[in-house]
Amino acid sequence: MKRFYSLFIFTVLATISLFGQQFNFEGNDPFGLQYSMQDSSRAALKSLFNDMDGDGDYDVIHVGIDSVVNNGKQHYSNVKYFIDYQENTGTKYAPEFASRLPFMPDFPFTTGYFSTAAGDLNQDGLVDFWVCCDADSSLNLKSLLYYRNDPSGSAPFSIIDSDSLRLNSFVRASIFLPDLTDLDMDGDLDLLMCGYQTELSAVTRRRDKYYSYMYAKNIGSPSNPVFKGWYPDPYGLNTSNLPTYATSGDIDNDLDMDILTLTQLDTFEIFSFLENVPQPNGKPFYPNALNDPFGLPRANRLEGIYGHSLVDIDADGDLDLFAPQRMLSTGTAIGFYKNNLCEPSILEMNASICAGDSVLLAGQVFKTTGEYFISIEKANRCDSTIHFSLTVLPSSQLHLEKTICFAEAITVGGNSFSESGQFSILLTNQAGCDSTVFLDLMVLPELEQDLKQAICDGDELVIGSQIFTESGQYNVMLTSANGCDSLVNLDLTVNPTYQSNVEQAICEGNSFTIGNQSFSQQGQYEVKLATVNGCDSVIMLKLSFIPLNIGVTHLQNSLKADMEGLQYQWIDCGTGTNIAGATAQSFTPTANGSYAVILTDNNACADTSMCVEFVLSSTTGMNISNRISIYPNPTNEYINIYNNSGQQLTSIKILNSQSQHIKTITNPSSEKISMSDLEEGNYILELLIGGQKVIKKLTVIRE
């Protein structure tokens, strides 16, 4: 249920006459403002108050002289300026300024002197600067407009000089201090300057100073200012040819722009109040100056007051005064003079509402928890502030999922439920807000279930706390978490698993496939398959290669394959072609050359011997191949060579299965030869015994 509350505020509206208006000195460097750095350097000549970061409160920019170069010459470039920044980290009602930092690196200072005013000239939400003045090659002075672009970009300002603005330059040695103000109250910022121009005296040949106001009216649009001027001493303004610095604001809260000046009068600096008395046509007019107004101080020749600023620092509806000053009574700092035209008043209010409800306060509607500051304008245009603390109490929601047995019921908030369904029950919690219970209720029926299940031998089926591993029919009584009975009629089948052993011999280089797995290396393998029932079928495979002895014995006038009972085809290694008719175990070459034999067994396994060099000889030779044996074969470390030929073993040449030479052992000192440096695989041994070559095949394995 949504409710709407309206809170009425009764305020006492009071007015203070102009003559009772006072600026009371409240102290130096308030709210964390820093007149200078800790080492007293970079003392502020003027503090500009603007919302630099767009968060709704006033930040401050300090400008002044950083250093002066003493090189014996008087030139604008000898004076170095600074511009520093303090962010307001408090609120518009209770300001608190962070430590002072440079406004930005490499600020584009003028080549003349640097005096600035700040305001959003083109209403883009960024504070712009008007600077006076830059010096040209003839030392004439030009005002500059610094349009602020992206503050974090590579070109934070677009700078426009007075020539482009169609404003005349000031003659050399002139000084003017700018103020941006909506003097004619037409909604845009105009430019009001006060200072002096110089003129060369025909008598003294020195440049005399002539003090005046200079006014440039903004005749453009709010987003594209265009200035028309200069108008000297406009609207009745007059410096009386005295050094004057002016700033503007609605000092007396009558909705027009007044002016507060700081003037050098004899040996004193005094404040003067120039009240705006608008003419019938609405244009401003300043007929009189009120000296030493509002209890503001004056400085003697040993003291000094500098660029003053008007700002409503505490958001109470009137303008307060800040002025860098050097006073014997209060010291050197930024002096704070609070305007008593509007006495700050803060009304504390607290309220609590339920979620979905709202509060109407001072014409504003509030629906969310928070701290709010609400300004209410009084009859004298002063602001009264309401500090409103609102707490929104949550409307509680509870989601219940309940399951009950048939014929049972559940009660929520006095309501009884015994059927399955979703229900919404509206209650009221202790805070008086809605509390909604969303009930999702399931009523379980009397349950009996037939379950037919199959498992594999060695697996188990668990129902409740019971375990089943054998085929059969079972009645299982269960109790659910909510206490309802459930009967399960179980029909269980246990399917067998299978295991078989397979020994298979294949030709080296071939493969053997079981299921979707292929094997091409000899060894033992466990192959898991699945039966039609999804149970395991395990095959233990022992795979070996069918051996072929590709040894060849070189006889006196023939070559003989060492292995019997095979198919033979002798080839000429020189041409790589089969020798016609040479298909017996023995082959008698008719010419010198290199020969080999292709051996094929009954399993169609085939292998080719090493090529053997054959030289026709008339000497009767010995068949010594059968008298040479190598064991163990296969081996993983050593071989023993049994030589029963009666001839001396003079060398062993070892080649891999691609006939690449691996190594040669000359005049072996022992018949036990190490093969530990060979990788796993098949090798050919060429044994030179009594001048004859004997070819043997060797298999090396690595376990």
Image: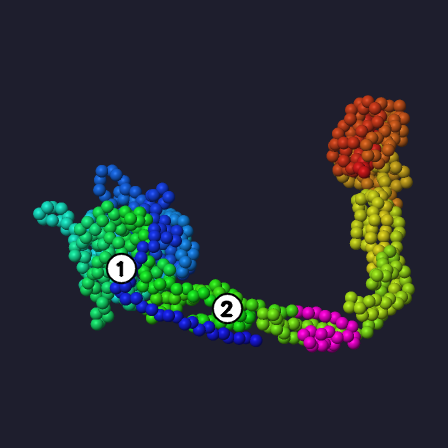
Nearest the camera: 194 or 291?
A: 291
As drawn, 416 above or below 568: below
Amino acid under label 1?
Phe
Quadrant containing the C terminus in the rendered view: top right
Highlighted magenta segment, given as a residue range: 399-422
Amino acid under label 2?
Ala
Report x, y in % for residue 489.
87, 69
Determine if the magenta segment contains residue 413: yes
Q: Which mark is residue 351?
A: 2
Q: Along the horizontal axis of the image, is 169 left or right of 2? A: left
The secondary structure that dominates the magenta segment is strand
Please give the name of the residue rendered at 82% of the width and 41% of the height, measured from the top-left corner. Answer: 607
Residue annotated with mark 1: 294
As drawn, 215 above or below 299: below
Binning the other alpha carbons within 10 Å of mark 1 as few (below 14), some (14 to 19) or many (20 upward) gives: some
As drawn, 347 above or below 690: below
Please give the name of the residue rendered at 82% of the width and 53% of the height, measured from the top-left corner. Answer: 528
Q: Distance of mark 2 from mark 1, alpha carbons? A: 41 Å
Please give the name of the residue rendered at 58% of the width and 72% of the height, measured from the top-left corner. Answer: 432
| Mark 2: secondary structure | strand
| Mark 1: secondary structure | helix
Q: Along the horizontal axis of the image, is 352 left or right of 305? A: right
Nearest the camera: 259 or 427?
A: 427
Nearest the camera: 107 or 535?
A: 107
Please identify the quarter of the rendering in which residue 309 is found. bottom left
Report x, y in % for residue 24.
31, 57
Quadrant containing the N terminus in the rendered view: bottom right
Q: Earlier in the sequence, mark 2 or mark 1?
A: 1
Report x, y in % for residue 625.
87, 30
Q: Is residue 126 visible?
A: no
